[in-house]
Amino acid sequence: MYKSYGVDSGQACGCATLAKLAHVSRARVTQIIDLTLLAPDVQEALLFLPKIEKGRDRINERTLRSIMAEPVWDKQRKLWNALGTKGA
């Protein structure tokens, strides 16, 4: 049976514990959590980006940092659309 180790469940006390449980760095956990700062429709658009068959993704965590740093969702949408992506 799947066992949840979420912060909300009280099983994990922070990013360091989550990182240890997931076998990733604290920085990676922070990067993943920061994705929740994106407007919901931008998150959805990210989830439905087409699969990359050849080469590297144009959209990566580093590309998204400036968008995640913008607290206003309407401005995030403009930045996302400026990337030339479909959706959102």
Image (tube, rainbow, N blue to C red):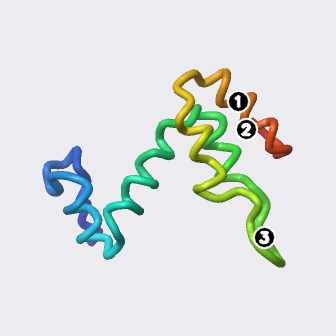
Residue at 67 percent of width and 50 percent of height = 46
Task: Give the side of residue 61 with respect to residue 53, left or right.
Answer: left
Residue at 72 percent of width and 34 percent of height = 79
Disc 3, disc 1: CB below 8 Å? no
Question: Which tag is nearer the camera, tag 3 or tag 1?
Answer: 1
Question: Which tag is nearer the camera, tag 3 or tag 2?
Answer: 2
Q: Which mark is residue 80?
A: 2
Task: Give the side of residue 67 with respect to residue 5, left or right.
Answer: right
Residue at 76 percent of width and 67 percent of height = 51
Q: CA distance from mark 3 to mark 1?
A: 23 Å
Give the total of numbered labels. Answer: 3
> What amino acid does circle 2 point to?
Trp
Disc 2, disc 1: CB below 8 Å? yes
**Lower position in the chain sequence, tag 3 or tag 1:** 3
> What amino acid does circle 1 point to?
Arg
Q: CA distance from mark 3 to mark 2?
A: 19 Å
Q: Quadrant of residue 81?
A: top right
Give whichever of 78, 53 is nearer the camera.
78
Mark 1 Cα-neighbour bin, 10 Å: few <14, some 14–19, many ≥20: some
In the depicted structure, whether residue 42 falls above or below residue 19: above
Residue at 57 percent of width and 21 percent of height = 72
SS under mark 3: loop
Which x, y percent locates residue 1? 27, 72
Q: Quadrant of residue 49?
A: bottom right
Q: Which mark is residue 52?
A: 3
SS under mark 1: helix
Q: Which mark is residue 77?
A: 1
In the depicted structure, whether residue 79 falls above or below residue 56: above
> What amino acid does circle 3 point to?
Ile
SS under mark 2: helix
